[in-house]
Image (cartoon, rainbow, N blue to C red):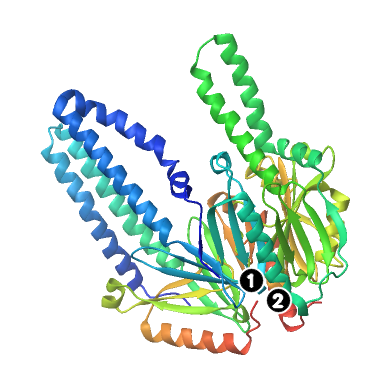
Amino acid sequence: VTPRRTHPLSPLIQAAPAVPAAAVFLIGPGSGLLSRGGLPAIGLAIAGAIAAYAAFVAVAWILWWRRTYWIDSDGDLRLDSGLLHRSARRLQLSRLQSVDIVAPVLARLFGLVEVRVEVAGAGDSRIVLRYLARPEADALRAQVLGMARQRESDAPEGDPAIPLAQAPAGRLMAGLLLRSVTAALLVATAALLVVTVLAQGPAGLILVIVTGGLPILSVATEFLANHGFRVDRTAQGLRIRRGLLSTQTRTIPPDRVHAIAIVSPLLWRRWDWVRVTLTIAGVEADQARPDVLIPVAPREEALRLIGEVLPGLDIDALPFESAPPRARWRAPWSWRFLACAITPEVIAARSGRITRTVSIALHAHVQSVRVTQGPWERRLSLASLHADTAPGPVAVVARHLALDEIDDLAAREVEQMRRARLTPWR
Amino acid sequence: VSVSPRLATARRITLLLAYAVVVLGGVLVALSPLATAWLLVYVGLAAGVLVWSWWIIGRRVRSFGYTERDDDLLVVSGILVRRLVIVPYGRMQMVDLTAGPIDRWLGISTVQLHTAAATTDATIPGLLPAEAAALRDRLAARGEQRNSGL
């Protein structure tokens, strides 16, 4: 097996984002210097720039040369890199989690793609190869998947995968566009455009770029990441597949789910759509793709999915205790919706007015209970109850409930936590 | 059980150290060609904040407290925002005992509890070393007895 290298153009493409910054630097302070220094300074500056560029290219090229990857005889993917600080990374392909092929715009112009290989494990357990030519990347992907399957022969392969839910592209797009913040920004953009046209001044345009660009960017990335979202039930748990440019597959073992949240933005409620996110123990959710069970789905479908994860949980029958009317002085918009419920299995909290959220944590996985009371809450004799769980996207917080009720809830929650620890549920 | 009043001394020393910067700022104001009125305003503000912080530190320190119950540890703190943290012994992952230079000089230390949740904020500052060590050992022992991990 011979070590291979990434494509020779890679360093240049990776350095490309720095070009505008360098240009701005050269044009800005550089020009001032030149006008003062005259011809010798210009010559010096150009010589300096060329020297710096040459040095940069040399370093980048040596780094590229020292960066090699190969699949060794043990079936491990290995990556050696570094000049002064050599590093050798080794991924066991038998524990493969996902192989993603990502094509950033700039690299795509040259027909190059980025390959990300991820294995199960804590921390940074992946190798990112940027960039490879498309055919080479496909070959590597096939080889890696082949290796993984070979090693996995003891695991039941081809077990029946029962499709549970998907997010059709149209619904996904509509849902993303109608998320509260996105929709508000888009409306603001339209309004600003009208104002700009009427006033015939360029002032509004900059704002338009910000208010219009941000939501379009976020919608586009989320759409690409969640395109073709589908959930299947397999023997190991729920399997989630998603992505347009890069396909990502993740299996969620139900007993690792610590908390879930059901989110319904204002404009989704007309169709009764919800989004469901999860906190899964031991999985570092990275910012670009938080742990989503379903990005957008009708409520019944979402509830059925949740039933797969937490069997025997009836979300519509949770005994919610609401915040008292005096909470309106602290939360004038959302006080009607604030509530908390404790059942023998879970603690649940509702919050939000524009975007409504129901967060649910299992007693068996709640780590600690916190009661907080801000100055306003003390005036109104209110308090908030936090149920701390493993790090993840879900935060279970019952806000602004009556103080005596909070005391009671906290005591009950502590009691339930003890019981859940002694007798593991499920 | 409340914490040692030495914690207030420690925090006040830190406050005074921070005030070295403030005094430096005062010197700058005095040197710069600004009216004396500004200098008076500056000194007045600085002195006012110092007195207020001095007083609030005392109250904050008195607000810290903890109770060991049969199955869990209670920690209360805060005056403006009041907090109560309940950590079951079985959920503790580790117990930290720390003491900075000023703390060591005054003979106090801080016990901090960690669970699997990053948001758990159970810190008990200002314990006498003997008390802190004893608390840590008791907590560790109970944690072991009741440990159920995740």
Q: Is residue A407 visible?
A: no
Q: Secondary structure at mark 1?
A: helix
Mark on residue A151?
2
**Which sits in the foreground, A191 or A76?**
A76
Q: Amino acid at mark 1?
A: Leu
Quadrant location of residue A249? bottom right
Q: Is residue A201 above or below residue A84?
A: above
Q: Amino acid at mark 2?
A: Arg
Q: Which badge, 1 or 2, comes first in the chain's sequence? A: 1
**Which sits in the foreground, B97 or A30?**
A30
Q: Is residue B97 left or right of residue A152?
A: left
Q: Is residue A213 above or below residue B116?
A: above
Q: Is residue A19 left or right of residue A412?
A: left
Where is residue A295? Give x, y as percent. 75, 49
Q: Quadrant of the N terminus of chain A?
A: bottom right
Label 1–label 2 contact, CB within 8 A:
yes
State the residue at coordinates (63%, 31%): A185
Residue with the mark numbered 1: A93
For disc 2, the chain is A
Quadrant location of residue A389? bottom right
Where is residue A347? Give x, y as percent. 74, 64
